Image (cartoon, rainbow, N blue to C red):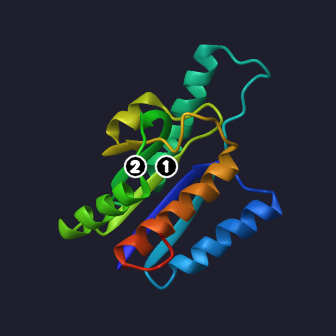
Amino acid sequence: MLNLTLICVGRMREKYYIAAFEEYAKRLSPYCKLSLIELSEVKTAQNPSKAEIKAALSKEAVEIYRHIPSGSYLVAMCIEANQVSSEELARIFFDKAGKGVSRLCFIVGSSFGLDEGLKQRCDLRLSMSKMTFPHHLARVMLVEQLYRAVMINEKSKYHK
């Protein structure tokens, strides 16, 4: 069975985002095991310098590393990365499963993004869009796309 882990910096507090996320998690449950790990964002000054941001991202990366399941195919979600279609994401799942990879770990950073070293360690970098979204909405969008990818591979009518 496919194991999907989402490591996200920041905690969802808005009930509507939580409900939407839980709906897609429920839909995914017959097809895979989904784990959500929420980590605290490192606090910075009101207008942090580049050095302060870099230090905060480095501290967040240390915590992220501690939670990555061993043997995971790592995917960094970052705005500057390549964009893929839903079909291409489904193909990535299918290809990894064919190669014996059963753990995929998606990493969503804080409002400042992800540590550069962490991004370089990842097997794949993905961007949902060149547009900026609230991180909690992006998390819901990601879990919906994970569900859509599974449905594409299941040849379901969900994806038309």
**Which one is earlier in the sequence, the residue at label 1 or at label 2?**
2
What residue sits 23% from the left and 63% below the top?
A: 95
Task: Name the secondary structure under disc 1.
Answer: strand
Residue 38 in view of the camera: no
Image vertical order of residue 155 relative to residue 142, above or below: below
Q: Position of residue 130 (x, y in %)?
A: 54, 34
Location of the N terminus (image quadrant): bottom left
In this rendering, the answer to whether 127 lies above or below 49 is below
- Residue 75, numbered circle: 2
Badge 2 marks a residue whose secondary structure is strand
Q: Which residue is under mark 1?
A: 107
Circle 1: residue type: Ile
Judge left or right: residue 21 versus residue 117: right
Which of the pair 26/41 is nearer the observer?
26
User: What number is the disc on residue 59?
Assistant: none
Residue 37 position within the rendered picture, expressed as x and y whole percent measured from the top left: 57, 60
